[in-house]
Amino acid sequence: MNPRFIIVSTGSELTAGRSQDTNSSWLANELFGLGYSVEKFVVLPDNPELIAKELSEISVVTSTERPVLILMTGGLGPTEDDYTLQVVCELTGSTPVLNEKAHDRLQALYRLRGRNFQEALTTALRQVSIPSKSTVLNNSVGIAPGFWSELRPGAYLACMPGVPKEMTAMFQEELVPLIRTHFQSAKLYSDFLFIWGLSESLFQQEFIEKLDFFKEGKAVWGVAAKRGYIRVTYQSENQETVAKLIQLSKEKYGDLCTGDLFEELPELLIQKKLTVGTAESCTGGLAAKLFTDRAGSSEYFLGSIVSYANSIKEAILHVKKETLEAHGAVSEETAREMADNAVTILSTDLSISITGIAGPGGGTPTKKVGTVFIGTHIKGKGTEVKEYFFPFKRELFRDVVAATSLFALYNRLRKL
């Protein structure tokens, strides 16, 4: 069966413009990678009548021959404006049933916080209940479980939390296997790559729009903007077409192209039996976090020095006082000394150094907010420092810089 996919995001904060709906675009990109296309996005406020009306209207226009899967996020919490459980119970003729696994996790959380679970029992139980006529989607990150329900023959509903970290884990761990069991994706070949330092719009303008593959309907493409790179996916019924598009991308963008760097860099470090550490200023340890987010990182990542203040750069990283006075903390010279000295202090084979101006203040006419120097040191090969300019808000700037620092190291290592 080739299903229709509709994504519904609920939350009055979304319809009021106080928050952005990032869940829908993430889900659409993941489904695209699985060989499915999304028909439309729907954003609704926390209004049970509107939610029930929308779900009913979607499910009516369906059949077992052309099924629909509605992926809904939000409304699974314990507060009064969380209506998902109530609405789905009414639509399916269900009653709320306690999910024991989620209930146990909730009790453990209350004990950890020193709170009396019984005092909050009424609202708490709603958060850990699912409709009786549904299949649970376990939540490995948070408390509230999701669930998979059949609204009518051929109309399926998957409800997940609105919190992005909880939703993404639940989708990958619980929902993808169910989707693959129930629906057959289009018979398409697919492949992807990362392209660093490039925007979606520029990629489309200078690459996609110039290729006949897409104009002639021989392939489809999708792109998701990430922190410092775009993730490009190609699909076609012809495997050679996909391979050709990957090849053309690499010819166009060269060293800016990688596979999944966050998997490939650790594999490269393990393969070459190399250790790495970081010396960070403006990123405050975010590069170290990217390394240690991956299980087993202790095999290659040894540690980090967060030298936010100049006094720490001098005392711990042994950056010369003369260097700081002559060139400033945000300079090629300081980044070089940070990287050079980090390998000795941390006893590693490799190091990354980062020093920049995250803003909103601190910029000068010659060094604007968004300026950053990233150094990479390889024992026996020395240090390379590159200057970048990322004119983003503070949070995005720090995330982009941290990710780009790993790319800078990977780019050197893969050429050895």
Image (cartoon, helix red, strand yellow):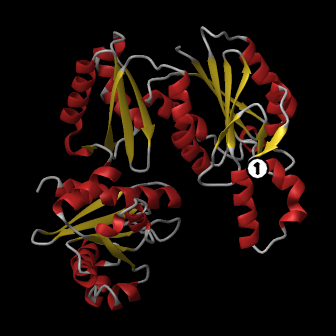
Task: Point out residue 101 in the picture as x, y percentages from the top left corner.
Answer: 69, 52
Image height of 73 relative to 403, above or below? above
List x then y, in percent, for residue 341.
24, 81
The amino acid at mark 1 is Val
Vertical comparison of 266 with 137: above or below = below
Residue 46 in view in this figure: no
What residue sits 44% from the left and 28% below the top?
Answer: 34
Residue that label 1 marks: 128
Report the residue at 35% width, 65% height from top: 297
- Residue found at x 25% / y 19%: 241
Q: Quadrant of residue 303?
A: bottom left
Q: Taking 191 as reference, is 308 left or right? A: right
Observer-nearest residue: 274 or 173? 173
Q: How many marks?
A: 1
Q: Is residue 16 visible?
A: yes
Position of residue 65 measured from the top left corner of the image (x, y, whole percent): 60, 8
Mark 1 is surrounded, within 10 Å at the Cα level, by few (under 14), some (14 to 19) or many (20 or more) other residues, namely many
Quadrant for the C terminus, please.
bottom left
Q: Nearer the viewer, residue 160 or 228?
A: 160
Residue 304 in which image quadrant: bottom left
Position of 177 with respect to 147 (left or right) is left
Instruction: Identify the residue at image location x=28%, y=88%.
Output: 318
| Left/right of residue 62 with respect to residue 38 in the rendered view | right
In this rendered view, identify the residue nearer to me: 410 or 114: 114
Along the line of sight, the residue nearer the viewer: 188 or 360: 188
Q: Is residue 64 above or below residue 311?
A: above
Label 1, secondary structure: give it: loop
Rendered location of residue 310, percent (x, y) = 39, 84
